[in-house]
Image (spheres, helix red, strand yellow):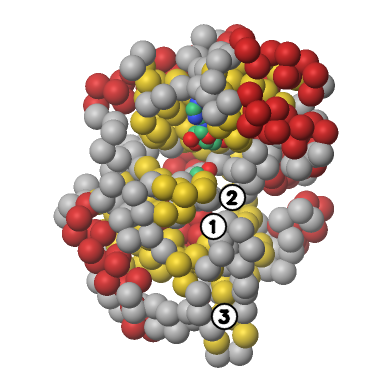
Amino acid sequence: MNVLVIGGGGREHALAWKLRQSPRVNQVFIAPGNAGTALEGRNVEIKVSELNQLLNFAQQESVDLTVVGPDDVLAAGIVDLFENAGLRIFGPCKEAARLESSKSFAKRFMIRHGIPTARFGEYESSRAAKDALHDFGFPLAVKADGLALGKGVVIAQDRREAEAAVDDMIERRRFGDAGRKIIIEEFLSGVECSVHALVNSRSYLVFPTAQDHKQLCDGNRGPNTGGMGTFSPSRQIDAGLLQEIRDKILDPFMQGIRQDNLLFRGLLFPGLMLTKDGPRVLEFNCRFGDPETQVLMPRLETDLLDLLEASITDQLDAISTEWDNRSAVCVVMASGGYPGDYETGKAIAGLENVSEMEDVKVFHAGTRRRGDQILTSGGRVLGITAVGNTLSVASKRAYEAVDQIEFDGRYFRRDIGSV
Ligand code: AMP
Ligand code: GLY
């Protein structure tokens, strides 16, 4: 069978790597991919925004299953496009993907279906938003309604910061149309975590836990990024809490998509805050996490193709999954300056030193090949993943590999998996 993975980050590299291991897969195509995915299959030079070209390619190459990585491609309606053309594709339809691409849509869904979340209001005028601030107290969260590369949330400590965030989003359109509408939310304190669940219209299957480190600097300090590393399992979620998450969040979610007639055959990855009153949903992601996928795939022993097919054919209740019960750690190596401005085109040295290391896998993100060299081409460059009997063994192994890899300005955290 031929499989097409859409996207070009570390998440897509991990998915392509895992799919390639399936005895039923002949060819993995990755559009547009990166220098790492080229080692797992064939990269295709089509941008993720070129939906019709992706469809033409899938038809020409007899692609049997397409797997979508990024949220904006789902929000653009790729699943509807492929399904209307009779092609099999993994992911929620455009309307269901609004659970991630519109925060107000997600909040209304949660309220309608009794899913615990922060109190909120939605506003299209900066005047109305500013008038409402006192209803929430400080700190509070100001969020752009639409997709903003994970940067559209400001935690404002006081009125001045909140008003600046409102003006930035609504008046100055800092996030373009994503900030045409904003939501304001009460601040929730607690510990953050997330779960991954494979969903179809009848049932869901929860993956082992994984946790990311969003902040740039050691000790979980500094600005938020797309994710500087991950580890699995998470220390926050035990069996009792997982049951509570099923009862209060995942079960009502399933009832909600059924009642609202939302076609969701894909991956649900809610971001949660564990408050003293129980878990609250901060956001719904409707896709695999990046870099969570880079620690989940090395632990997955079941054929990923079987899992994805079970989701799109509504057979999840009939499938059992096997996971490696060891731990995994992924350390992201980034370009100096990320998440702000950074340079690209730096030669990466030392990849060959780690390619034979046991229980280590390097997932590429922002990389490209030029001749014999592999160059940096993005903010997050590599995700160095290792498995081991404990988190600390996995972490030590991952850092042994990280230390072998050099590029000008490389930056990474030293404490992934240990805080
Ligand atoms: P979101 O994209 O909505 O998950 O928000 C991004 C980050 O902002 C989250 O991972 C939290 O760290 C923080 N955040 C969002 N909403 C809240 C809230 N209501 N209270 C506290 N922190 C929040
Ligand atoms: N690691 C967080 C995300 O994928 O949204």
Name the side, left or right, on which 308 lies relative to 165.
left
Q: Residue at x 80, y 19 (%)?
A: 127
Give the mark nearer the N terminus: 2 vs 1: 1
Mark 1: which secondary structure?
helix
Mark 3–mark 1 distance (CA, rounded to whole Å): 22 Å
The CB of the residue at mark 1 lies under 8 Å from ligand 2: no
* Type of amino acid under label 1: Glu
Q: Is residue 224 above or below residue 108?
A: below
* Type of amino acid under label 2: Gly
* Front: mark 3 or 2: 3
The x and y percentages for residue 348 are 49, 81
Q: Is residue 125 above or below residue 208?
A: above
Q: Which residue is mark 2?
A: 69
Callouts 2 and 1 close, C-beta under 8 Å: yes
Q: Which residue is mark 3?
A: 346
User: Is residue 295 something that shows in the picture?
Assistant: no
The CB of the residue at mark 2 lies under 8 Å from ligand 2: no
Q: Residues within 10 Å of mark 2 (few under 14, many from 20)?
A: many
The x and y percentages for residue 310 are 48, 38
Residue at the bottom extreme, as displayed:
372
Q: Residues within 10 Å of mark 3 (few under 14, many from 20)?
A: some
The x and y percentages for residue 142 are 63, 28
Q: Which residue is mark 1?
A: 12
Name the side, left or right, on which 218 lies relative to 19.
left
Mark 3–mark 2 distance (CA, rounded to whole Å): 26 Å
User: Is residue 47 something that shows in the picture?
Assistant: yes
